[in-house]
Structures are given as structure tokens and as C-alpha cells.
Image: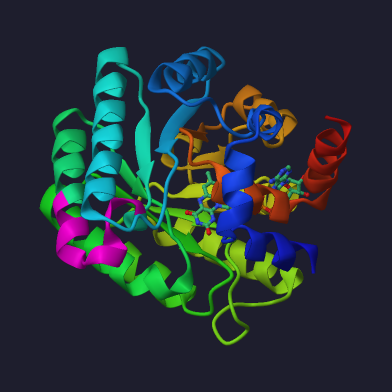
Amino acid sequence: MLRQTFLFLSRHQKLRHWFETSSRAQQLTSRFVAGETLDDVMRVVKELQNAGTMSTLDHLGENVTTVEEAETSRRFCDEALDAIAASGLPATISIKLTQLGLDLGEDVCRRNVDALVVKAQAMGSRVEVDMEASEYVDRTLNLVQHFQREYGCMRSVLQAYLFRTDEDVRRMCALGVPIRLCKGAYKEPPEVAYPKKSDVDARYLQLAVMLLDEGAYPAMATHDPRMIDGILAHAARSGRKPHEFEFQMLYGVRRDLQQMLVKQGFRLRLYVPYGDSWYPYFMRRLAERPANAFFVARNLLRS
Ligand code: FDA
């Protein structure tokens, strides 16, 4: 119930405006968001690398409504790639296709993504494509498929909560597209996604096993210790070596688990968001864990 409420609020424009202009709310987001500028995020990326963790940079933003906004987003991502190249670190960028104009037309989006993928390929990096609400899945996978065929430096997210995902895993594995598997963070109707968490968890493990068996360098995005145990057990059974897959987690979430995996010699990449459009991202993090919401409410009331 709380999860649904926060996911509903994540699309509430007036509340978004209030939050994004409240300095107290901005302070509270610093646990999940690395800062507003590229310098802020690169500082964090370097610290993480020193602690043995790779990064994927996310310049926050989604569902832009004009071509100019989409081009501005592309410029931010482009600058992030330049900063990664200058740092020499094995970082990638994560993008949302609605941030690059998917709602305005596939041609607008394709043009923006193309510029980024060309640069990522030239510098030996990768563009990771986040998966948004279910209405975008077909268009996202079509574009990923196209760019993977042309340039070969993509990674696509698939969400375990969608009924369709086992077929998508099979198709993407056959095409050699590396996958980041997550549980799924959007408000979806019961016609397309498992409503019960226990079903999503069971599905996640099945799909993770498929990816370990058939996937090209899969990325397991989860903070759930039961998922991690299951993944490690299957990797050991099936002979997948620690350098043949990676774990991914969100910046600021379960630092204890992050350190444990790195200590044990597993590859870990953190998803590090930055920028000033943090509201929808932040609300989805509250939806995942009600304790975060109580912490925020207590601090806002205090201020
Ligand atoms: P689960 O929600 O069961 O949480 C397991 C445990 O992790 C909790 O008990 C708690 O301890 C901790 N935890 C989880 N979330 C927390 C939070 N916000 N704050 C504090 N503790 C928390 N989704 C999507 O739809 N499209 C996408 O492209 C992506 N991309 C993505 C990238 C990466 C790197 C990650 C880690 C996740 C995503 N997600 C995503 C989000 C994902 O779908 C999912 O909502 C969250 O990862 C939470 O699911 P868990 O697997 O962690 O399990």
C-alpha cells in the first residue's frame, strides 16, 4: 500500500516542485544522490574506485517534453562520457530513453542515443539503458537491439516483475545483449506484472539462473541477500567465474553488503545518480523501503 502511494506521488508535479525547491529536502536526498554537478559525481566515482567499486553515472531526468530538453540531457550525458574518458576509470553511463526524447518520437531519441553510443564505443565504455514503465519496454528493446548490432557497447535492463521478461531474457541472450537484471521499480497493473513480492523474488532467481547460464556478462542488480546467495550458489555450481558477471547496487543502499561483496572478490558497480531532477528517483527509493520514508518525514517535520 505504501509502495503504491509513493509510486503515485513520484508522478505528482506540485509535490515535485515543492520538494525540489526545499533546501531541507535536498539535504535529505544526499544519501541517495551524489550531488548536483559533474564534479560532485566524479569525486564520488573516484572514491568508489579507490574502495574497489566501479560506477555507472546517471544524470537524473526522465520524460522530457521538448526536443530542446532532450538535447540538453544528451549534452549532460556527453559531458559525463568525456569526464569518464579523462579519468581513465572503468565507469559507464546509464540513460533513460524518455530523458532523451522517446515520448517525442523514436527518431529524436535515436539521434540523441546515437551520439552517446558512438562516443562510448570509441572510448571503450558502455551505455546502460534503464528500463522504465512497461509501456516503454518494446520501444526500448528495439532501440537497444539496433545499437547493439551497430556498435556492440550497450547493456539493457530487464525487470523480473514483468510476466514477459523470461522471453525477453531469451531473446536478448540470443542477440548477445548484456543484461542488468532488477526486480522493477514502477507502478504496474496486475495484467502485466506480478503484484506479490514473493512471486517477484522467485522470478528474479529463475531469471538470474538463466542469465548465468546463457547471458553475456550479466549484471545482477539487487540488494537482497537471498538473491545474492542464490546467484553465488548457482555461479559456483555452473562454473561462472567471479570476473564473468557483476553485481550492481544503488549508491547509498546497503553499504554493508557492498563492502562484503568487494571483500570477497566479486565485481560490484554502483549506480550513482546526480543532477537536480532527483524527485521521481528519490520517491522510487522511498517506495522500496518504508523506513526511508519515515526517516524523511521525521526530518522534514523537525525543520
Ligand atoms: P528488495 O526491494 O526486496 O530489497 C532487499 C533489501 O534491500 C531490503 O530489505 C533493504 O534492506 C534493501 N533496500 C532495497 N531498496 C532500498 C532502498 N531504497 N533504501 C534502503 N534499503 C533498500 N528498476 C527499474 O524498474 N528499472 C531500472 O532500470 C532499474 N535500474 C536499477 C539499477 C540498479 C543498479 C539497481 C540496484 C536497481 C535498479 N532498479 C531499477 C531498481 C530495482 O528494480 C528495485 O526497485 C530495487 O533494486 C529494490 O529491489 P532489491 O532487489 O534491492 O530487493
Residue 163 percent across, percent down from the top left: 53, 79
Identify the residue shown where x is 42% and y is 46%. Answer: 61
Left/right placement of residue 183 relative to residue 288 reads left
The magenta segment: 99-111
Identify the residue shown where x is 22% and y is 57%. Answer: 109
Q: Is residue 236 visible?
A: no
Q: Which is the main secondary structure of the residues drawn in magenta?
A: helix
* Magenta stretch: includes residue 100: yes
Residue 275 percent across, percent down from the top left: 46, 33
Relative to 271, is 53 above or below?
A: above
Relative to 51, is 149 above or below?
A: below
Relative to 299, is 86 above or below?
A: above
Choose between 162 and 43: the one closer to the eye: 43
Choose between 38 and 48: the one closer to the eye: 38
- Residue found at the far bottom of this picture: 191
Identify the residue shown where x is 59% and y is 55%. Answer: 14
Residue 15 percent across, percent down from the top left: 64, 53
Choose between 84 and 231: the one closer to the eye: 84
For the C terminus, the image quarter is: top right
Residue 78 percent across, percent down from the top left: 24, 33
Choose between 85 and 148: the one closer to the eye: 85
Q: Is residue 191 visible?
A: yes
Q: How many marks?
A: 0
Residue 5, image quadrant = bottom right
* Magenta stretch: includes residue 289: no
For the N terminus, the image quarter is: bottom right
Identify the residue shown where x is 17% and y is 37%. Answer: 121
